[in-house]
Amino acid sequence: MTFSFAQELPSAASGPDTDKSTDAAARRLLAARQSDGHWVFELEADATIPAEYVLLRHYRGEPVDGALEEKIAAYLRRIQGGHGGWPLYHDGDFDMSASVKAYFALKMIGDSPDAAHMQRARATIVARGGAEHSNVFTRLLLCLYGILRWESVPEMPVEIMLLPRWFPFHLSKVSYWARTVLVPLLVLQALKPRVKNPRGVSIDELFIDAPRKIGPAGKAPHQKWSWFILFRALDALLRPAVKLFPKGLRQRAIDRAVAFVRERLNGHDGLGAIFPAIANSVMMFDVLGDSTAAATAREAIERLLVIHDREAYCQPCVSPVWDTALACHALLETGDGQHLAAACKGLDWLLPRQIFDVAGDWATRRPDVRPGGWAFQYANPHYPDLDDTAVVVMAMDRARRTGGDDRYDCAIARGAEWVKGLQSSDGGWAAFDVDNTYNYLNNIPFADHGALTDPPTEDVTARCVSMLAQLGETTNKSEALARGVKYLLNKQLADGSWYGRWGLNYIYGTWSALCALNACGISHEAPELHNAAEWLISIQNADGGWGEDGPSYRLDYRGHEPAASTASQTAWALLGLMACGKADHPAVVRGVHYLSLTQAQDGSWEEARFTATGFPRVFYLRYHGYRTFFPLWALARYRSLKASGSAKVQFGM
């Protein structure tokens, strides 16, 4: 299958004029700045988060905001798939859990079950086995609503909070996102609060069997039968045992869980600064009768809303640090003095957000490392992000080289120190933790999403390698850098590509790795770079762009499957090829033409498709900023390389 752009591309020999496109894209990016100089774009997921927002309001019995709910309903109706249900990404396949939640939210808002879109959704859900095939998180929501019994979900006793670190399951052995979601949920499962649901809405019609008779969920595709059977047996033994736990022990465990949440409540940014954890903390404080803490957490959710004239939705989180750092890189690439000033203002906004005073959860394994990272969101001090930190440090280093200013020196040094301190034992870097590689835990019944841990990944490792190399470290003098490069080379696939955990997917991973290896001074003629470049060239679409979609995360992945071109993925491919010294290659020229031809009059690009990843196969993201700063970055780099006559990219990204 191939995808063609309607307008015929000029020949590669004609050479695109990038000035107009680059300048227009830069103006568009500058126009998107906040008044204090930073950037924050919308961050969109699938139907689950806005649906859960509606259901949380009705769970608590909050006053109905009819205008807001109608806008959310309009959004949910628009993104309903042609198959009748709701997908995990634009034009994606039916997903049971997203469909059940979207249907439930629309019915709660007031859409009649007899409406055509509701009938189509219900028929699709039932035809695929019914709501009993929802994932564990959806089942937990339905338990809180009293639709399912608690026996329908895995037994997760709150006494988990008291387990020693050597125990096979411990909070430090799961990822930050699992940790913050799970802890308040343990309290809810222990206390089993009663839903308010003033309208008394239920969704029994989505089930094949009677909801109150449904047992535990089956094995997820990624889980191994041996592990699953073992954990299912342990779950069966645990259920009756929990009833025998002393009340004093349970209260001590609840107290520890509550203390964990309070320490990380994070004001109006919320627990973990992610919607599922914040929502669980709201419900936890409700059942504990702490209205003040519940109100604080609830306000954090309200700040995630995106409200337009006709539609509204709730974001899973916000991305100001990530957006600002990447926007600064794109502007710095242009070489324009005014753009440098704008980038420096953005970097100045980032300066005070570096975390010096909190040793977060990462310190459990690295207690001797000083804090110095940046979080992804406005505030999330217990959970700084290695990817963000590396990208911020590289942007600040670029700015100080260009402007000769030393005001970023301390921030750069501490950021690099923290990143080096969190290198995992295999030479790679994870997003938030160190050596969080207890992969057997993805086989427990609770982990049907397959993302309970935070192991090192190729893309984050590439970013950290890029940072160290850009700062002047070399593989013959820096053990950390040498180990990072070895990790990357060992992870390259036979076709020349690298996996992308946080961006979609092999195009993202390959771009990241190529930038890192180039920054380390590895020859463009090295087989690793040559093979990767050949892979990127081989998957270019007929329209000159590049595209990749959610199915690339399939467990039975057998190689690239063509998908419609997008601006951001085209930019990644171009940046990757230019890191290999391919600025003059016809594929690069065609890709630059594609970006120029698909650019709108206002300097932006349309990009409805999702090009980022929360959890592979489960949760995808659409960063609205990606279609703005990545194409600008690629166009500006192409222009600068052509103007200089050099094939060498000088920076880590």
Image (spheres, rainbow, N blue to C red):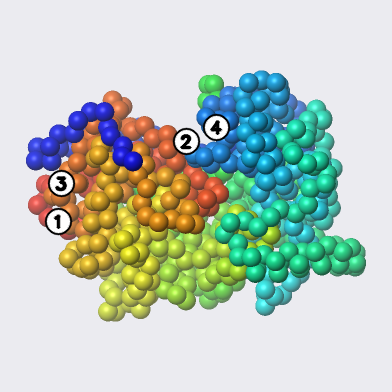
Tag of residue 91: 2
Q: Residues within 10 Å of mark 2 (few under 14, many from 20)?
A: some
Q: Residue at x 30, y 61 (%)?
A: 496
Q: CA distance from mark 2 to mark 3?
A: 31 Å
Vertical position of residue 265 compared to residue 438: above or below: above
Of 186 and 136, the residue lying toward us: 136
Q: Secondary structure at mark 4?
A: loop
Label located before the other in sequence (4 or 3): 4
Q: Is residue 455 left or right of residue 100?
A: left
Q: Secondary structure at mark 2?
A: loop
Q: CA distance from mark 4 to mark 3?
A: 39 Å
Label located before the other in sequence (1 or 2): 2
Tag of residue 647: 1
Of 129 and 358, the residue lying toward us: 129
Label located before the other in sequence (1 or 3): 3
Tag of residue 586: 3
As shown in the figure, which amino acid type bears the numbered disc 1?
Answer: Ala
Quadrant containing the C terminus is bottom left
Q: Is residue 515 left or right of residue 190?
A: left
Q: Which residue is mark 4?
A: 83
Counting labels gives 4
- Mark 4–mark 2 CB contact (< 8 Å): no
Q: Position of residue 51 (x, y in %)?
A: 64, 35
